[in-house]
Amino acid sequence: MRHRIVNILRNLAPSPAISIYRRLSGKGGFYGDYSTWEDARKLCTGYDVDIILEKVMEAALKVRKGDAAYEQDSVQFDRIRYSWPLLAGLLWIASRNGNRLSLLDFGGSLGTTYLQNVRFLNHLDELRWGIVEQEKFVQVGKRYFENEHLTFYYNPDECIGERRPDTILFSGVLQYLEKPYEVLVETLRKGFRQVILDRTPFLERGEDRITVQIVPPEIYPASYPAWFFNLEKFRNFFSSDFDLIAEFDSLESFNLGEIHDSQGKGFIFRRKELGR
């Protein structure tokens, strides 16, 4: 019966009633198929709420102090959950660049992916990890988390001007941008040699889809619009300028209700003129 109600609600035009129903269901996840980003956004709390930053900062500080092994989206773990293909890609890039890695982590929170992988990277002759984030995250990052390797910036140009990164990382971020392809076009024009993506949701069939993500209430009370990208369209976007080095399944499955062809994936691309 509950599944029938959910299906009926999904077929209706977005409304506050649907949002209320989903919140009261007590279950996090991705829901709906919205015509515009604005339609979905109206039902969401968004990212710019203090509780998210507070939860992430609390978890990240525990990782820094050694009281937790790893955090992701404010959730603490007693052991690190590695994305081994991502780590292999980082080491592969460094090995082809004189044991050096200079990277722009777009939307990298307070250093989640850096802290996840630094044990395998701190032997490099040079490690430069620049995070571009929202203003409040950058302020906290600069105050509590910056070190000789990890730095925080308000925009890509600031990071590029200071660090000269040749690799850009999008991990769990593209789906939360209103115009993700426009962001990709703008950032890739800046000449990055390698592009790594991880924790990104895709559909094997159908058009790009706008959903609403409800965060499980035990993490924090929040919701935001989120894209599911058509897999073939996404691959083709890179095909003219980049070689696909690797494609892999991410640790997160990104199940979309009863849509069984949704999945989380990652990619490693290298600019064509550089060869494979």
Image: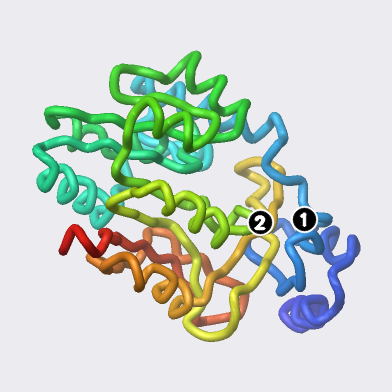
* Residue sitting at the far top: 143
Q: Amino acid at mark 1?
A: Arg
Quick one: SS at disc 2? loop
Tell me which corner region of the image, top left, top right, bottom left or bottom right, holds residue 120.
Answer: top left
Q: Are marks 1 and 2 in contact (CB under 8 Å)?
A: yes
> Which one is nearer the viewer's eye here, 7 or 249?
249
Left or right, 46 with reference to 156: right
Which numbered disc flags the more N-terminal residue, 1 or 2?
1
Quick check: can you spot residue 115? Answer: no
Residue neighbourhood size for the residue with mark 1, other residues' Cα within 10 Å, grouped as few (<14), some (14–19), many (≥20): some
**Residue sitting at 80 percent across and 57 percent down?**
24
**Residue sitting at 68 percent across and 66 percent down?**
211
Left or right, 218 with reference to 60: right
Left or right, 14 with reference to 216: right
Question: Which is more foreground, mark 1 or mark 2?
Answer: 2
Q: Amino acid at mark 2?
A: Glu
The circle on residue 171 is none
Q: Position of residue 92 (x, y in %)?
A: 15, 50
